[in-house]
Image (cartoon, rainbow, N blue to C red):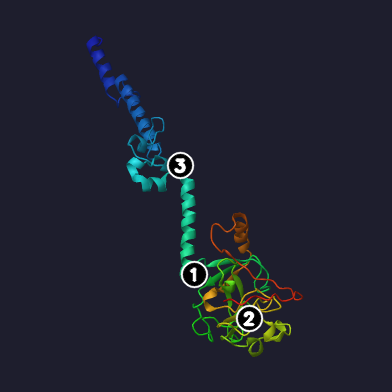
Amino acid sequence: MSPPSSGDSGSDGSDAADDPSDGTGFGSGDSDGGASRTADSSAADASDSSPAGGSSDGGTPSSSRDGGRSRSDDVTIEDDGVVRWFLGTDDGTVVVVRDVLSSVALVAVIGLILFAASGIWPPLVAVESGSMEPNMERGDLIFVVDDDRYAGDGAVDGTGIVTHENGDDHEKFGQPGDVIIFKPDGSEYRTPIIHRAHFWVEEGENWVDSSANEEYLGGATCDEVPTCPATHDGFVTKGDDNSGYDQYGGAATDVVKPEWVTGKAMIRVPWLGHVRLLFDSLLGGLLVPQPTIDGVVLSPTQPGVSPSPAS
């Protein structure tokens, strides 16, 4: 039998190399193709495992390549306008200004609400002295309202103020009757006083004999009290911790006319008034006129100070 020709041998070898199902290996062309496919698969896996919105070229977010902005630092006046820039920027100076304006706006809103409820400005005053102790202490912050608001039963006609004399069913700050804020002798230059309205008197009335408690006059008669008889209608007042009426040895004021009353006390907030008193002492009351209210303290042993009747 003759040996196979070289052409047959080459043909068989080539067929074997080209047939992937014959033998255990691939031909050289298939090996390169397999390697290429493996590399492509790895690249695809790497692409799939990259972070969302990112890329493989240095980790730069795709939003940056696309021109998008993901941080408030990128807010600009040109692109977003002044308002959006002011509200969204992280610039340090703007943040401080924004916080200050927010605080001022909050205080303003609270102030408007309090003003709407009270009807007077300022609606909060600080107590300077201890003449109303223990029902009001120095440094208390007092919410006050217009005297004709929230009037109780038995209020004096035209005032909305209930006196101690008629206040059995109207207790305020530990005792019957309203606590009022008034300008002594109607003066715009004296510190307002916060004391309790004890009773109402008519012009020409001998109130020492008709309504007064002798204990608070030290036995004095109408002739010895400069504000008796009354020169006009009004209230006789007294500090809860004082030993005498304001119209005789207390606040050195005449009978309090209704128009001298600037408000009546409603709510006491302990201690917060000290902040107001501190600012007033440092700034001399320049920020807000009459930010405090006085309560003249009269010692039980102190002789009465005789006020001159107001004209």
As rendered, which of 221 and 51 lies closer to the eye? 221
x and y percent of residue 145 in the render?
52, 73
Residue contact at pointers 1 and 3, CB within 8 angstroms: no
Quick one: label 2 or label 1, which is nearer the N terminus? Answer: 1
On screen, residue 213 versus residue 11, left or right, reads right
The disc placed on residue 120 is 1
Determine crowd level at label 1: few under 14, some 14-19, many 20+ residues with C-alpha closer than 10 A. Answer: some
Amino acid type of the residue tagged 2 in the rendering:
Thr
State whether residue 278 is above or below residue 5: below
| Secondary structure found at label 3 | loop
- According to the image, label 2 marks what residue? 227
Quick one: label 3 or label 2, which is nearer the N terminus? Answer: 3
Q: Quadrant of residue 74?
A: top left
| Residue 114 makes an appearance in the image | yes
| Residue 272 makes an appearance in the image | no
- According to the image, label 3 marks what residue? 91
Q: Residue furthest bottom?
A: 210
Which quarter of the figure is the N terminus placed in?
top left
Amino acid type of the residue tagged 1 in the rendering:
Ile
| Secondary structure found at label 2 | loop
x and y percent of residue 104 in the render?
48, 55
Disc tally is 3
